[in-house]
Amino acid sequence: MRKVLLVIILTLSLVGESKYDNHQILYTNIIGSATIITWGVFNWDYGKRSMHTSSEGWFGKDTKNGGADKLGHFYTTFAFSHYFAYLYQGFGYTQHEASKQGAISSLLLNSVMEVGDAFSTYGFSYEDFLINALGSYLGYYLLMHPSVNEKLDIRLEYKPTKRITQGDSYDIFTDYNGMKFVAVLKFDGFEMGRNNFLKYFEFHTGYYTREKQNGIQRHPYLGIGINLSHLLRPISKKASKFFNYYQMPYSYISH
């Protein structure tokens, strides 16, 4: 645990290694950390246990969520690295600096969450920490390689389950029964598909789990979908960018 805390402290110190005035980034990270800790105290039992670790495994059928929680961490750190990068560009940072700081902020805030878990019933998960680092790095990599970024999306599909829609206090952030995680290759990002009908389509490879009476069922799948971000780009750039991160249900066929 001491090694993990040292990594987090070093990560936070990187926020200051810039030619820019980093007060805005520092305040963003402080507010984000405070929000996570507050939510964790009221919803994730932060502070109810002494510091401890737990090994959750990866994608095995004998794990609690069949790996959906790991992809949830991966998606969250990936998406937040991009969110913070766009936010920091609005603060006046260059794309390179904003992308770097965005990835650091995403990893930092999710590491705060992991440390909070160490004092809850969950326990600190090294698997979660590693997948968080991978998601943050991929977010940075794609922003720094636009030719790859225009071809590849990482998306989340979510439909609230009955536990949510019927007003249960079940945590929406861990409602894995309603989630699907998908990596998407967009044909309009390739030269062969930019000027023909292929630009309206995309290839999906996804994964989801469903909790049944006999345990967790794991479902990898392949699919072909409609490229909504391309369709909406002439109408609204913001709306089209949203669909780079969110997978609209029923807009694809899968097997």
Image (cartoon, rainbow, N blue to C red):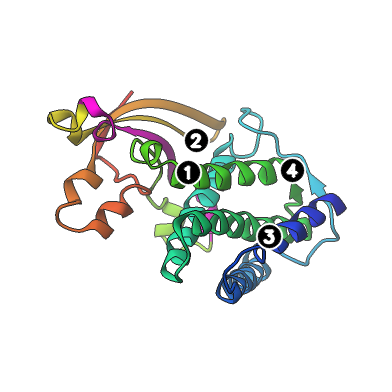
Whether 19 is drawn above or below 143: the answer is below
Farthest residue to the left: give it.
Answer: 196
Q: How far apart are marks 3 and 1 (CA)?
A: 37 Å
Disc 3 or 2, which lies upstream in sequence? Answer: 3
Where residue 217 appears, x then y in whole percent? 52, 30
Q: Which is more N-terminal, label 2 or label 1? A: 1
Residue depicted at x 68% and y 70%: 41
The quadrant of the picture occupied by the C terminus is top left
Q: Alpha-carbon distance for marks 3 and 2? A: 37 Å
Specify the amino acid type for callout 3. Leu
Kind of residue sitting beneath label 4: Tyr
Residue at image x 33%, y 40%? 150
Q: Residues within 10 Å of mark 2 (few under 14, many from 20)?
A: many
Q: Say which quarter of the image contains residue 235.
A: bottom left
Tell me whether the residue at label 4 lies in contact with that at label 2, contact meaning CB atoms closer than 8 angstroms.
no
Q: Do the residues labelled 4 and 3 touch (CB within 8 Å)?
A: no
Q: Do the residues labelled 4 and 1 touch (CB within 8 Å)?
A: no
Q: Where residue 14 is drawn, which disc sits there?
A: 3
- Residue 220 position, x and y percent, is 45, 26
Circles 1, 2 touching at the beta carbon (< 8 Å)? yes
Residue 186 part of the magenta-drawn span: yes
The residue tagged 2 is 209
Say which residue label 4 marks.
126
- Disc 1 and disc 2: Cα gap in Å? 6 Å
Q: Mark 4, residues whose alpha carbon is within 10 Å: few (<14), some, or many (≥20)?
A: some
Expressed as whole percent of the image width and height from the top left, the position of residue 30 reads: 63, 73
- For the residues carrying marks 4 and 2, which lies nearer the camera in this image? 4
Q: Which of marks 3 and 2 is in front?
A: 3
Residue 41 belongs to the span the image colors magenta: no
